[in-house]
Amino acid sequence: MPIPESKSEVRARARQTWAQIMQEPRTPDTVEATLDQAFRSFLQSQQHRKNDAICLAFHAMGAEFNVLKPLKEEGWSVALPLVLPGFRLSFHLYLKAGKEVLSLEKGAFGIMEPGAGSPILEPRKDDILLVPTLAANARGFRLGKGGGFYDRLMDINPFHQMEKWAILPENLMEAGFVEEPHDLRLNKIITEERIATYP
């Protein structure tokens, strides 16, 4: 049974954990390397979706796991978000079958993102939302950085219908925070040890 924690406590602990993981010199058995391998293996298991679905992902910054490198090398089509006023996001095609089709520039919060004039992607319910995630609780609810960008997407069609993935180290699973009504629930979490699936 997880020890009850506030979201702020979990965020602080998760940020520290991610920083330690991403600063550790990489060898084949580090958490970063095993997460990378687990994600690649998972992507290979999803080949049947690769040709039909676009993965709405994110550009890592700071102590975040780099999801783009495996997606690119495995030949996925990927869209990246552009931060808009009012805590909104639009998505823009960045990789088509692993090939870059859009240049990025430094935008809000120092994140590399599509330019403001980039063509906007109209997502479909069969696309996949790969969500930046600090930690998750035992019921698969995600804890993000606190801005609410992705939680707000769940009020918009077709985002709430998409399958939602996240990548987490095993020790940030089953965090002790209680989800709130607006929190986003993940469908699959890839860890270095397993694929956790939620309804």
Image (spheres, rainbow, N blue to C red):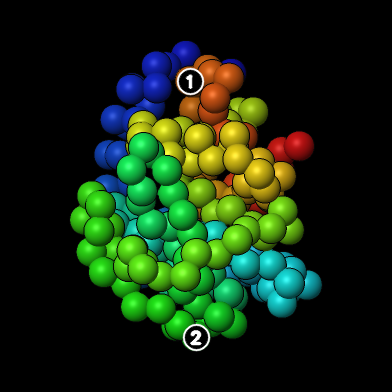
Q: Residue at x 23, y 49 (%)?
A: 109
Kindly identify the amino acid type of the residue bearing the numbered disc 1: Phe
Q: Which quarter of the image is occupied by the N terminus?
A: top right
Residue 90 picture location, percent across and down: 46, 54
Q: Earlier in the sequence, mark 2 or mark 1?
A: 2
Q: Is residue 80 left or right of residue 183?
A: left
Q: Which mark is on residue 150?
A: none
Q: Is residue 110 above or below residue 137?
A: below
Answer few, some or many: residues within 10 Å of disc 1's Cα (few below 14, many 20 plus, some between 14 and 19): many
Q: Which mark is on residue 177?
A: 1
Q: Which quarter of the image is occupied by the C terminus?
A: top right
How far is mark 2 from mark 1, CA to CA? 39 Å
In the displayed orientation, state which residue is furthest to the top. 4
Q: Residue at x 48, y 20 (%)?
A: 177
Secondary element under disc 2, as helix, strand or loop, is: strand
Is 27 or 60 nearer to us in this picture? 60
Q: Is residue 172 above or below residue 178?
A: below
Residue 84 picture location, percent across and down: 36, 48
Which residue bears the numbered disc 2?
A: 99
Q: Is residue 45 left or right of residue 37?
A: right
Is 142 or 182 nearer to us in this picture? 182
Is 56 or 165 nearer to us in this picture? 56
